[in-house]
Structures are given as C-alpha cells and as structure tokens.
Image: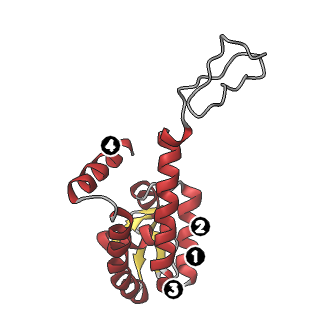
Amino acid sequence: MADPAVKKKAGGRAPVAAADGATAPTHYVLERQVGHLLRKAHQRHTAIFAREIDEAKLTPTQYAALVKIFDLGEVSQNRLGRLTAMDPATVQGVIRRLQARNLVVRSADPENKLRRILRLTEEGVALVRRAIPLGRKISEATLAPLEEAERKVLLDLLERLG
C-alpha cells in the first residue's frame, strides 16, 4: 500500500526518493530552469548559425573575432579575448585557424613586444563584409518567434546576465 503521506504530483507520479531516503522537491521543473532554457535557445541559435553561415565556413567564435577586429581595425589578442568572451587558449586557437586561412595577420606590438596585434587581411575584410549580412539574418531567424518589444527586452536582459 502506498504511503498516504506522500502526495502524488500532477501527472500521477509520486515524488522520487533520493539516495538518503528524502523526497526530492516536487516544485523543481527542469523545463523552467534558466540553464535548461538558455541551452535550448543556444542549440536553436547554433543550428541556425551553422545553416546560414555555411558559405563562409566560420564557427561562432571565429565570426565574433573577425567582426570585432573589423570594428576596431586592429586589436591586441588579449583585448580581443576579453571583448569576445574567449579565454586566452580559445582566442589563440581561433586566431591560429584564421591565420591559416589568411584572414588575420598577427604581429608584435611595437610598444610592447609581448603583446600581439591583430589585423584583418584583404581576404578577411572581404569575408567579414559578406558575413555581417549573414549575421543579421541569423539574429533575425533566432529572434523570429518574438515580437519587436520582446526582442529588445530579451537582449537587454541577456546583456545584464552576461
């Protein structure tokens, strides 16, 4: 006979007992948790990105690096990492791959020999000019389920979280 003290939650299933015998909280719904929702939204955006950016053959981190270098003209590798939310190892790998494609050149900073300055090559500039409209299309497709006011609120809130 079932324990009458343990009430069934909606859907007819009783709470799950933890290893120590305690009953897990029933008010925790994975599908309503911020991490789960952010991961699902990220998966959707990543699929859209991969489909739309295909011609440019860029990863999201490569795209971010190229666009930020384009915006600034030149930037230290360290600062680029901070501006694009990449750790030093990641930004180093991204830049190495972009250099291999002749999209970015890296040189020593004349004022600080330890610092590396990044610039786009002509091929890099041309690719960014083709890729930015794709980036706009990707953002539009990602935000398509939302109305304009909701888009602004979402972007503002995500900026605050980041």
Disc 2 and disc 4 in contact, CB within 8 angstroms:
no
Residue 12: image location, x then y, percent = 62, 31
- Point out which mark residue 102 bears: 3
**In this figure, which residue is indicated by the disc labeled 4?**
160
Work out whether residue 64 or residue 32 is closer to the camera in this orientation and state it.
Answer: 32
Residue 130: image location, x then y, percent = 36, 85
Disc 2 and disc 1 in contact, CB within 8 angstroms:
yes
Regarding mark 1 in the picture, which secondary structure is present there? Answer: helix
**In this figure, which residue is indicated by the disc labeled 2?**
93
- Point out which mark residue 97 bears: 1
Amino acid type assigned to the residue bearing label 4 in the image: Arg
Disc 3 and disc 4 in contact, CB within 8 angstroms:
no
Above or below for 143 versus 98: above
Which residue is at 46% across, 71% downward? 48
Amino acid type assigned to the residue bearing label 1 in the image: Arg
Disc 3 and disc 2 in contact, CB within 8 angstroms:
no
Amino acid type assigned to the residue bearing label 3 in the image: Asn
Which residue is at 52% across, 42% downward? 31
Amino acid type assigned to the residue bearing label 2 in the image: Gly
Crowding at dot 2, Cα within 10 Å, few <14 / some 14-19 / many 20+, comes out as: few
Q: Which of marks 2 and 4 is nearer the N terminus?
A: 2
Front tag of 2 and 4 = 4
Which residue is at 54% across, 56% downward? 88
Work out whether residue 157 or residue 68 is closer to the camera in this orientation and state it.
Answer: 157
Work out whether residue 7 or residue 83 is closer to the camera in this orientation and state it.
Answer: 7
